[in-house]
Image (cartoon, coloured by chain):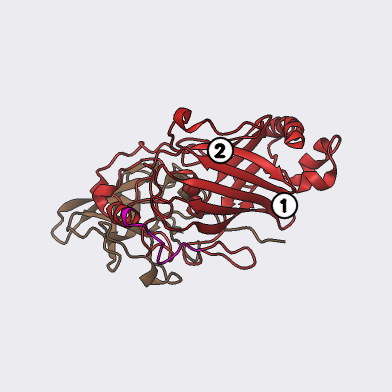
Chain colours: A red, B brown
Amino acid sequence: MQRMSALPVRTTLVFLACVALAGCDSPSRTTPVAAAATPAATLTTRDFTGVWIAIGTFDDPAGPPPWSQTLWPSNPPFTEWGAAESRRLSEPQGFTPCSPTGPVFAMWELGLFPIQILESPGQLVIIRETGGMPRRIYTDGREHPPPEELEPTWMGHSIGRWQGDVFVVDTVGTNGRARAMNGVGANVQVSVDDAKPRLPTSAELHLVERWRLVADGQLFEDELTISDPKTYTEPIIVKHYFQRRPDIDMLEFSCADTPRPADETIAEQ
Amino acid sequence: MKATTIFLLAAFTAAAPAAAHHSFAPFDRSKEVTLTGAVKEFQWTNPHAWIQIMVKDDQGRETEWDIECAPANMMARTGWNKSTIKPGDAVVATVNPMRDGRSSGALVTITLPDGTVLGPGDAPKPLPIR
């Protein structure tokens, strides 16, 4: 964490400078500045700042090996409550247009929309193009609040620590109201992987992620261990891969620009 | 023009496996309707863009069709902008119609006055991994 707290200051400055220069995601631009105080080997494996989009397509949601996304389970290890909640989320009335997603969906976004990661002293922030809440991961060494003080939120409370070249993110405190982890809407099928049960999460969600840069920093791998004893009898573990996209600018997205009745839309965001 | 134009609306194109994109959603993926008419309005919006097209039948009666597209952000990354179509433009649109018979559909392709064919919007294509 000491390394982490020193590095982002420079990363942030680089980011701000790059904003002015239009284009900040190339490792070749960020490395020389930050390398002044940090070993280059550490930097190239730890710089998550930039715009990213999950790889995979609708017809090939896993994407090509060796960086294939783990597809969602066809037979999730549901508890009785989890199975019932999955059925509820599969009905049109179980879906509220423009309702927020949770932290698992945020680390995927179906490959349709980019995310932007900004590292700053003490916290790493994930901005999602589809709007809603940013995901904020504290890196200042704090712990989660005690359960009696933990405010339930859509994205939960996240803390991150480095273990070697792996950034480990621990999230608790979600409110259990987010949409399914694997779909934007009730019955919406946006990929060949979508004809599967909707995967709910409850307020008992405990998400542990292991982030690491792979493919020379072109991709980052997020291994998500999704534990939710109210919903699943055992953890679900998936790997998602994001590709660094310096060619993509984040755009504004307001979910309420075209309000339509839910029954007239396929998948309101 | 992209070989496959697929998005939330799950457009059927020659390269897209038809069986992959079905849902209980209100549009019938198994049907396509071709609409020839003049653009009345274009709402360049998220979470989805919409186009209204006035279509004349054999007797000259006009019907307004309400057509759903992808999120404007996804369209912007696949060749669209707010000025791509304008009121009065003569267009040919192929849509998956609504199941309930209303004059509404999900865009599959649209042919612009200059012959350009666009899909409903798509995710950015992945970059090659070096």
Q: Is residue A73 a member of the stretch shown in magenta?
A: yes
Residue at coordinates 40% horizontally, 59% vertically from top-left?
A190
- Name the amino acid, label 1: Gly
- Few, some or many C-alpha atoms within 10 Å of disc 1 (few <14, some 14-19, many ≥20)? some
Q: Is residue B105 a member of the stretch shown in magenta?
A: no
The extreme top residue here reads A149
Q: First in sequence: mark 2 or mark 1? A: 2
Q: Nearer the viewer, residue A128 or A254?
A: A128
Residue at coordinates 72% horizontally, 52% vertically from top-left?
A217
- Few, some or many C-alpha atoms within 10 Å of disc 2 (few <14, some 14-19, many ≥20)? many
Instruction: Identify the residue position indicated by label 1 in the image.
Output: A217
Q: Quadrant of residue A15?
A: top right
In the visual, does A46 lie left or right of B49? right
Q: Nearer the viewer, residue A20 or A48?
A: A48
Segment tinted magenta in the rendering: A71-81
Q: Dividing the image into 4 quarters, which one contains the C terminus of chain A? A: top left
Residue at coordinates 47% horizontally, 49% vertically from top-left?
B74
Instruction: Identify the residue position indicated by label 2 in the image.
Output: A158
- Name the amino acid, label 2: Ser
Q: Chain of mark 2?
A: A
